[in-house]
Image: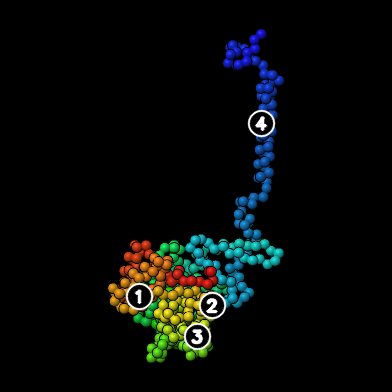
């Protein structure tokens, strides 16, 4: 009998029996194997369902027994407290807290927006940042390490393009001039208040409501003092440390909600390491910055600010040394070139009508050219941020 090797060659109606009952045996075992698979799947699902659920409560898995540390005062003095979390435009800051021996560590993620004030209450001082004194409220670091420099800073984009900060000082001396500056200048412009001004608390609140960051101007001894006199309670080279501290604290108490102080005159004072050292030590203890208007090339402010942990910014140009619109706009153009070359630039000026009008119109055009106008805190070097 001829063996038919290919199934396609077999005549219709003739079927071959598989050897060993292969196909039939498989069909007979199929239901049994299927049932076993179903039981295995059901068993695995039940075991997963009855297990602990670590992925459904990520905060429990990430931090064991987290503690709210921001409400607790540190055991050390405010002046020596740990630096506040840096404000980063790139996202939240991650702070690793070293735990006591034998305890698990905690990783705290702080939103940078939580450090600064809510814009709706930016005109109100933070109670935790106020020290009562005989002369009035003084800025101080909060018990949790926050500084006035951080809390009262105006937010900005965090972009790394060309940035310019402009500080317009002399506010408070003239009611109409102060009102005009607050009303006309864009909120990105930083405003400086003179301690001899009137109603500084009211003007501070008006400026903060409009979104401005502010600084307090400190009268420092110039050459030819007292023939050239910055005004009441000037800090002098020949003054004792106690006398200079008293005069400084009087200035600091004139209003609140400022991030830094800025020199008013001071060409002689800024060359004295002892006198400037006393000033910088006080600013570092209180958590406020220092802005040098750039008028003196011999100023020791940069190195003394670094030594005392004081945020520092130095002006690149005084924009209204010549009080004429064209000259002011030329200086602002110089600032743009500087900003494009090194990333940022700082200009200082006074609340003259011609200065306010020139800066207001320039700011609108500068934005179109890709310049970002930023508050002074955005371009300050901060030793506590590294």
Of residue 269 and residue 13, the one placed in the foreground of this image is 269
Of residue 228 and residue 342, the one placed in the foreground of this image is 342
Mark 4 or mark 2: which comes first in sequence? 4
Of residue 343 and residue 202, the one placed in the foreground of this image is 343
Residue indicated by mark 1 = 319
Residue indicated by mark 2 = 308
Q: Nearer the viewer, mark 4 or mark 3?
A: 3
Q: Quadrant of residue 350?
A: bottom left
- The answer to whether residue 106 is left or right of residue 232 is right
Q: Visible in this render: residue 330?
A: yes
Q: Visible in this render: residue 231?
A: no
Mark 2 or mark 1: which comes first in sequence? 2
Mark 3 or mark 2: which comes first in sequence? 3
Distance of mark 2 from mark 1, alpha carbons? 29 Å
Mark 4 or mark 1: which comes first in sequence? 4
**Dots 3 and 2: beta carbons under 8 Å?**
no
Q: Position of residue 349 (x, y in %)?
A: 37, 76
Residue 34: mark: 4
Query: What colour scheme has been applied to the protein in the rendered image?
Result: rainbow
User: Residue at the spot x=52%, y=75% of the render?
Assistant: 306
Q: Position of residue 39 (x, y in %)?
A: 68, 36
User: Residue at the spot x=31%, y=69% of the render?
Assistant: 361
Q: Position of residue 323 (x, y in %)?
A: 30, 78
Residue indicated by mark 3 = 275
């Amino acid at each position: 009998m001829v063996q038919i090797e290919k199934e396609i060659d077999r005549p219709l109606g003739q079927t071959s029996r598989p050897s060993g009952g292969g196909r039939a045996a498989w069909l007979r075992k199929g239901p049994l194997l299927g049932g076993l698979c179903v039981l295995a799947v059901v068993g695995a699902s039940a075991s997963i369902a009855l297990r602990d659920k670590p992925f459904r409560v990520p905060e429990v898995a990430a931090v064991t027994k987290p503690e709210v540390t921001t409400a607790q005062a540190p055991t050390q003095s405010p002046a020596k407290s740990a630096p506040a979390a840096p404000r980063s435009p790139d996202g939240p800051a991650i702070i690793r807290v070293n735990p006591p021996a034998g305890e698990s560590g905690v990783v705290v993620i702080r939103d940078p927006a939580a450090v600064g004030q809510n814009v709706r209450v930016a005109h109100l001082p933070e109670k935790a940042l106020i020290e009562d004194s005989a002369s009035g409220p003084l800025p101080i670091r909060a018990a949790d390490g926050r500084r006035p420099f951080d809390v009262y800073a105006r937010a900005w984009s965090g972009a790394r393009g060309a940035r310019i900060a402009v500080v317009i000082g002399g506010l408070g001396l003239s009611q109409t001039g102060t009102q005009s500056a607050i009303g006309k200048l864009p909120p990105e412009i930083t405003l400086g208040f003179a301690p001899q001004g009137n109603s500084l608390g009211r003007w501070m609140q008006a400026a903060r409501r409009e979104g401005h960051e502010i600084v307090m101007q400190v009268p420092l001894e110039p050459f030819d003092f007292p023939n050239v006199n910055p005004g009441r309670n000037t800090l002098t080279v020949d003054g004792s440390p106690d006398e200079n501290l008293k005069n400084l604290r009087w200035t600091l108490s004139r209003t609140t909600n400022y991030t830094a102080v800025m020199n008013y005159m001071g060409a002689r004072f800024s060359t004295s390491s002892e006198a400037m050292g006393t000033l910088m030590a006080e600013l570092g203890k209180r958590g406020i910055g220092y802005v040098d208007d750039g008028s003196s090339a011999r100023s020791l402010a940069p190195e003394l600010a670094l030594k005392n942990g004081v945020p520092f910014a130095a002006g690149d140009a005084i924009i209204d040394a010549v009080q004429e619109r064209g000259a002011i706009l030329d200086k602002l153009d110089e600032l743009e070139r500087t900003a494009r070359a090194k990333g940022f630039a700082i200009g200082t000026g006074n609340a003259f009508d011609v200065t306010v009008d020139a800066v207001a119109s320039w700011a609108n055009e500068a934005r179109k050219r890709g310049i970002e106008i930023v508050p002074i805190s955005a371009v300050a070097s901060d030793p506590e941020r590294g």
